[in-house]
Image (cartoon, helix red, strand yellow):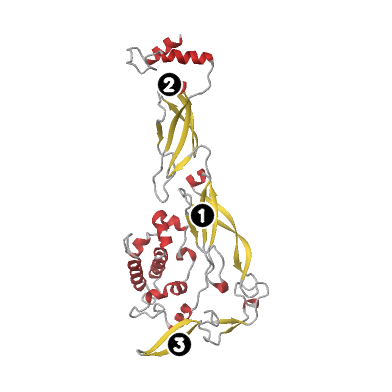
Amino acid sequence: MRKRDYYEVLDVSKTASADEIKKAYRQKAIQYHPDKNPGDKSAEEKFKEAAEAYEVLSNPEKRQRYDHFGHAGMGGGGFSSGGMSMEDIFAHFGDVFSGFGGFGRFGGFSSASSHSAQRNVNRGTNLRIKVKLNLQEIAFGVEKKLKVKKFINCHHCNGMGAANGTAFTNCNSCKGTGYVTRITNTILGQMQTTTGCPTCQGDGKIITQKCTHCSGEGLLRDEDVVLVKIPAGVEEGMQLSVSGKGNAARRGGVNGDLLVVIEEEKHPELIRDGIDLIHFLTITIPEAILGTPVEIPTVEGKVKVKIEPGTQPGKILRLKNKGLPEINGYRYGDLLVKINVFIPKDITRDELRIIEKLKESDTFNRKEHHEQSFFSRMKNIFE
């Protein structure tokens, strides 16, 4: 199903401020909150969709990339494709709901679920990798299998860090909830604060016996093969985000993202200018005067073009729609062929005599043309 525009999802304009985006997200999240719409799958999807839109538009770097490249610039990233749960959304954006009447500090989850929502959600770090593409791959899009060295979950403990994945006990400090609540007396009365448990780092559990393979970290260094779909029309320096393909997180957390940075390989005959391509064609003086068929390189192969008689140096031929596609669009650029006429420095005596004879003609002296045709005069010169 085609993703909706993130601005449309949150009902804001493309010039909306960060505060306006946050306010709009809170309204959407309250509207489609699972506690207000129990059992409504459609509302749940809209709740997740709003969270995905907010995750991008609330981040200046991601928002700029989205404004320029649309969903293709996110590389399919976002909560929906990344598989983040409702719990993860509240763990990331719980502050958005603070102080909003009728919804607790954890967004209205019941007491049983709010405890888990407050727990610290470990997140793996992002990875950045550069990918070189030739012009043909940029023109048509490509799938790349990338070998990535990264941290993965330990197979022996399922990433939990405990021997056999089960050597845990509830944290005594937080009683297994993952958070601690403190009440302090102030001049305004008692104030309650809730923070992640410092003893278990918000996990709610303590490892009693560490996994010997990963030393209790739950992570191992390994190599993974990631399939990345790169859309047509990408540009040098563009960054695609592949959700969940970065470093794994400790103890069943959320994986980081893989950031794919595009590099362009230089084409031997074509130069990129946005979605247009440029080719410099050098022809000889006789070819410029008499005209000639030539072959022009394109991303799809050679095409034949006729150089008209009397073509002037610097002339530009435009081959429509022979350029590159516009990313997230339906428009194609053109191929611009810039004509250069080769002037030889070293010529033979016979060639010199011909040139001297040409100098005497009215045509090459730029004098007023005679009524006879150009080709007739040329014929007379060489007879």
| Disc 1 residue type (three-letter) | Val
Picture disc at residue 182: 3
Q: On the picture, is 253 further left or further right than 367?
A: right
Per the image, the residue denoted by label 1 is: 261
Q: Taking the image as drawn, is residue 2 in sight?
A: no
Looking at marks 3 and 2 on the same chain, the residue that comes earlier in the sequence is marked by: 3
Residue 257 location, x and y as percent?
51, 63
Question: Which residue is most to the right?
Answer: 212
Measured in 3D between alpha carbons, the distance from the residue under mark 3 to the one under mark 2, in whole angstroms, is 90 Å
> In the displayed structure, would residue 161 be above or below residue 297?
below
Q: Residue at x 53, y 38 (%)?
A: 268
Asked which quadrant contains residue 375, the reply is top left
Residue 197 location, x and y as percent?
51, 82
Measured in 3D between alpha carbons, the distance from the residue under mark 1 to the one under mark 2, in whole angstroms, is 47 Å
Picture disc at residue 274: none
Question: Which residue is most to the top?
Answer: 383
Looking at marks 3 and 1 on the same chain, the residue that comes earlier in the sequence is marked by: 3
> In the displayed structure, would residue 254 be above or below residue 330?
below
| Disc 3 residue type (three-letter) | Arg
- Front position in the image: 233 or 261: 261
> In the displayed structure, would residue 71 be above or below residue 109?
above
Asked which quadrant contains residue 124, the reply is bottom right
> In the displayed structure, would residue 354 be above or below residue 263?
above
Q: Are marks 3 and 1 in contact (CB under 8 Å)?
A: no
- Classify 10 Å Cα crowding around label 1: few (below 14), some (14-19), many (20 and above): some
Q: Taking the image as drawn, is residue 315 in sight?
A: yes
Q: Residue at x 43, y 14 (%)?
A: 358
Q: Are marks 3 and 2 in contact (CB under 8 Å)?
A: no
Q: Tag 1's secondary structure?
A: strand
Picture disc at residue 289: 2
Looking at marks 1 and 2 on the same chain, the residue that comes earlier in the sequence is marked by: 1
